[in-house]
């Protein structure tokens, strides 16, 4: 057999496994699986293709058990894995299967001789003259398979798919690409990708099947192409994404009807959909020692007027909070790619240490021409009234909780109406929203309250953020972020007719930094100007940045090293780059289906003098943070 070629190794396998076979199949738990001699390939990738796997050391984790036939097959898989990655001489030299004294656990070590790989001398593109020369050169530089790399068959296939998709995204749906290899010296191969572009084509008529209650025009509005446009596979994928985003369909498929023999210049497109349930009702009933009994009801209609409009109502009642919310979404408002969202609520919270009443709503126009870019224009109006119990004002341990809720811990009562108009723009080219490895994010917002609008507060603010991610080598990710903003009030603070303090900027609009995703050497909301007593009270200008190096360690576990910097200042537009706070530290990441679970240890390089934490002078210069998702 290919995995065990030598008579000695065959005998060793027979003798070793015969001892294990004396026990019942599945009785022996695999507690260790290691490889010696693996230096030129990814050990994690090798482990992932094997049936024999190490079980979890966590008591409640998944256990794995030794299977003789699976292990024999894995010895063959190892050599096949190496051959596919350009190592034709790789062999399993030997293996050690160590049983414990009770013979119910086994530790396996496989010794591998990799040998010298066959390397790529060059990658040539032929028949790609339909593409500009500059683009051809860019393709050659960015192919997965590059000169001097081992001749990895997966990378070779990925390179073929890459150039083929470029042709099909440039109007050549009938394109074909062949891969050939030529000897270029001892253990060197020249890889040639030869293209037959075929006929340049355009989108033809679009057929829609499967819809029932959803108007056909609703589906056609999601098309990112029109008949007569140059054929591009990316436009078909974007259309499919938009159809799923409407939440109306359980299934949506966009496919081209190609005649590869005749190669007509017009390519018909068929869209197949299967509608889901457009009415949803969720009811939740529970009991808690704090909330006592609680009831929540959510009703949604996803195709309210037959044009993909979404209407939702939600109500909740408990002894701590209660209220109603309503929302409406018009996906096609006046122009293509423009939607209208209306939201309103009346909510009351009665916690033991504070009361909070909120009534108001928001209207938002959103223009999104494609997946990467959008902009919004919002008009909001909200009345808020709050009262904090004296016991909470005196309990410094809950101060950050009050601030996070938007409550002013300096005063027991506050009330006011915020009416504002806000404009935002956003561009996102990252490959993954939860764990980006490349691309960038740019966003900016300008907001104005008062002046010609009604309400208690008068201010304007401007903020922006940039993030940039790139991969260094094949495993390391460098992530950077810079965020800044300032808010400026119109007029001066004064005393209202009811005797309360009236400020042009509401307290919950002030800037605070510090926490799991911001200046990690400090706790949540601890970085800001201080009161005369040493408590953070927020500021009107903010600047913060971060740089992280992210590196996988083993399996789903990764490590990071970070530098955070920034500060908050009391005055509007008062950026002082000589007065920044810095924090450094390491962190760990574990990949989960909902994003990386992380733990970070941040250390302050220049502590804040006179800072009080929970009412006492700061006692330590480090913080430990647990969270889900990357810091940025």
Image (cartoon, rainbow, N blue to C red):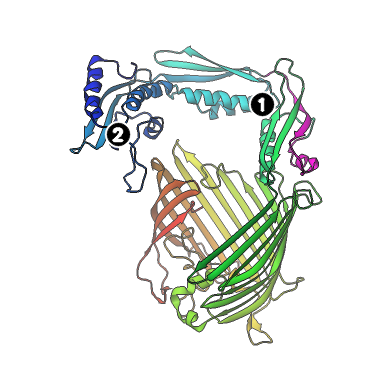
The image shows residue 267, relative to residue 393, as above or below, that is: above
Give the quarter of the figure containing the N terminus.
Answer: top left
Q: Relative to residue 521, is residue 246 drawn left or right?
A: right
Q: Are marks 2 and 1 in contact (CB under 8 Å)?
A: no
Residue 49 is marked as: none
Query: Quadrant of the rendered structure where residue 134 is?
Result: top right
The residue drawn where x is 52% and y is 82% is: 389
The image shows residue 500, relative to residue 330, as above or below, that is: below
Which residue lies under the disc numbered 2? 34
Query: Quadrant of the rendered structure where residue 573 is?
Result: bottom right
User: Of 627 and 278, which appears nearest the observer?
Assistant: 278
Mark 2 and mark 1 lie on one chain; the one further toward the N terminus is 2
Counting from the top left corner in percent of width and height, residue 626 is at: 42, 57
Looking at the rendered structure, the secondary structure element under dot 2 is: strand
Counting from the top left corner in percent of width and height, residue 405 is at: 55, 70
The image shows residue 234, relative to residue 309, as above or below, that is: above
Residue 73 is at least partly visible in this image: yes
Looking at the rendered structure, the secondary structure element under dot 1 is: helix
Q: Relative to residue 420, is residue 91 drawn left or right?
A: left
User: Of 453 and 227, which appears nearest the observer?
Assistant: 227
Asked if the magenta segment contains residue 587, the reply would be no
Determine the CA span between mark 2 and mark 1.
Answer: 44 Å
Counting from the top left corner in percent of width and height, residue 512 is at: 52, 67
Residue 146 is at least partly visible in this image: no
Counting from the top left corner in percent of width and height, residue 525 is at: 49, 67
Which residue lies under the disc numbered 1? 168
First to last magenta residue range? 197-225
The residue drawn where x is 63% and y is 19% is: 176
């Amino acid at each position: 057999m290919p995995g065990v070629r030598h008579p000695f190794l065959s005998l060793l396998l027979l003798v070793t496994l015969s001892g294990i076979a004396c026990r019942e199949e599945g009785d022996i738990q695999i507690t260790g699986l290691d490889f010696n001699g693996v230096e030129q390939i990814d050990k994690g990738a090798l482990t992932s293709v094997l049936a024999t796997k190490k079980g979890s050391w966590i008591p409640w984790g998944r256990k794995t058990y030794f299977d003789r036939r699976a292990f024999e097959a894995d010895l063959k898989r190892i050599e096949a894995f190496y051959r596919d990655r350009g190592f034709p001489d790789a062999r399993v030299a030997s293996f050690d299967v160590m049983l414990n004294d009770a013979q119910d656990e086994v530790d396996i070590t496989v010794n591998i001789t990799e040998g010298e790989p066959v390397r790529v001398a060059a990658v040539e593109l032929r028949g790609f003259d339909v593409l500009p020369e500059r683009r051809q050169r860019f393709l050659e530089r960015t192919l997965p398979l590059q000169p001097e790399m081992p001749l990895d068959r997966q990378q070779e296939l990925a390179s073929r798919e890459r150039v083929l998709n470029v042709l099909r995204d440039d109007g050549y749906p009938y394109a074909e690409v062949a891969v050939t290899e030529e000897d270029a010296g001892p253990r060197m191969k020249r890889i040639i990708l030869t293209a037959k572009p075929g006929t340049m084509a355009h989108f033809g008529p679009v057929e829609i099947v499967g819809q029932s209650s959803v108007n056909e025009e609703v589906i056609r509005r999601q098309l990112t192409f029109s008949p007569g446009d140059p054929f591009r596979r990316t436009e078909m994928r974007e259309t499919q994404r938009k159809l799923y985003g409407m939440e109306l369909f359980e299934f949506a498929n966009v496919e081209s009807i190609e005649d590869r023999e005749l190669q007509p210049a017009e390519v018909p497109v068929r869209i197949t959909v299967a509608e889901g349930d457009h009415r949803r009702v969720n009811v939740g009933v529970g009991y808690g020692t704090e909330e006592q009994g609680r009831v929540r009801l959510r009703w949604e209609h996803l195709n309210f007027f037959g044009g993909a409009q979404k209407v939702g109502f939600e109500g909740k009642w408990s002894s701590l909070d209660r209220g109603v919310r309503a929302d409406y979404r018009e996906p096609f408002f006046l122009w293509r790619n423009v939607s209208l969202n209306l939201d309103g609520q009346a909510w009351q919270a009665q916690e033991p240490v504070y009361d909070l009443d909120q009534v108001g709503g928001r209207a938002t126009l959103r223009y999104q021409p494609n997946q990467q870019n959008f902009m919004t224009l919002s008009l909001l109006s909200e009345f808020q009234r709050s009262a904090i119990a004296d016991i909470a004002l005196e309990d410094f341990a809950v101060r950050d909780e009050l601030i996070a809720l938007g409550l002013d811990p300096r005063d027991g009562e506050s009330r006011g109406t915020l009416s504002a108009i806000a404009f935002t723009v956003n561009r996102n080219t990252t490959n993954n929203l939860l764990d980006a490895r490349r691309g960038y994010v740019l966003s900016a917002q300008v907001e104005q309250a008062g002046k010609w609008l009604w309400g208690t507060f008068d201010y304007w603010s401007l903020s922006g953020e940039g993030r940039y991610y790139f991969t260094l080598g094949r495993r390391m990710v460098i992530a950077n972020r810079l965020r800044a903003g300032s808010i400026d009030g119109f007029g001066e603070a004064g005393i209202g007719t009811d005797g309360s303090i009236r400020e042009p900027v509401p307290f919950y609009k002030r800037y605070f930094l510090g926490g799991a995703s911001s200046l990690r050497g400090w706790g949540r909301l601890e970085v800001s100007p201080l009161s005369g007593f040493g408590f953070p009270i927020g500021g009107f200008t903010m600047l913060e940045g971060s740089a992280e190096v992210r590196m996988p360690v083993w399996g789903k576990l990764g490590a990071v090293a970070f530098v955070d910097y920034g500060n908050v200042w009391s005055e509007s537009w008062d950026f002082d780059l000589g007065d920044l706070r810095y924090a450094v530290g390491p962190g760990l990441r574990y990949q989960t289906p909902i994003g990386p679970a992380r733990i970070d240890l941040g250390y302050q390089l220049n502590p804040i003098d006179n800072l009080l934490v929970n009412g006492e002078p700061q006692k330590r210069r480090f913080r430990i943070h647990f969270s889900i998702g990357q810091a940025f």
